[in-house]
Image (cartoon, rainbow, N blue to C red):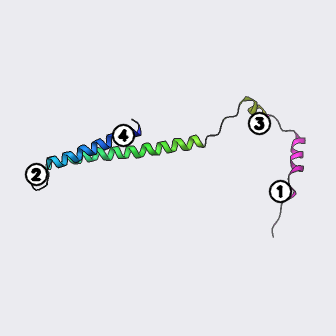
Amino acid sequence: MNLKELMEKRTKAWDEAKAFAESKKDEKGLMSDEDFRTYEDMERTIENYTREIERKKREEEMDKSLVTHTLPRPNQEETESLNRPIMGSEIKSVIKSSPQKRRTRRIHS
């Protein structure tokens, strides 16, 4: 059941519970013990719908978050390039081209 369907079912259950309570009140505005227990069962159903709606919302947020933070997989060519051996000359070239302050280690006294 999707989120919209759950919300519609909860709304319908709430409307039914309100109508039930109004129709079961006596001249003093009170329900019998049996009708009150039935109404409490209806409320529990509504609370269960609410919990499931909240759970579904969290699930959707998690799904969105995971889709947003999933990195694309490299294709075969990129994988081969990343897995190739690094030549010593490449390492030296990178070290020489890096800024001097990053290469030297500062010792603070």
| Disc nearest the viewer among 2 and 1 | 2
Q: Residues within 10 Å of mark 1 (few under 14, many from 20)?
A: few
Residue sitting at x 90%, y 50%: 96
* Residue 13 colored in magenta in the image: no
Q: Residues within 10 Å of mark 4 (few under 14, many from 20)?
A: some
Residue that sits furthest to the bottom in the current view:
109
Question: Which mark sits nearer the N-terminus, 3 or 1?
Answer: 3
Q: Is label 1 in a helix, a strand or a loop?
A: helix
Q: Amino acid at mark 2?
A: Asp
Give the image location of residue 84, x and y in percent. Answer: 80, 34
Query: Helix or strand or loop: what does disc 2 sit on?
Result: loop
Q: Residues under labels 2 and 1: Cα distance?
A: 84 Å
Dot placed on the residue nearer the N-terminal end, 1 or 4: 4
Q: CA distance from mark 4 to mark 2?
A: 33 Å
- Residue 12 vs residue 29: left or right? right
Give the structural element (helix, strand or loop) at label 3.
helix
The image quadrant that residue 48 belongs to is: top left
The residue sitting at 77% across, 34% down in the picture is 83
Q: Which residues are magenta?
A: 82-109
Task: Answer with mark 2 or mark 1, whichever residue precedes in sequence.
Answer: 2
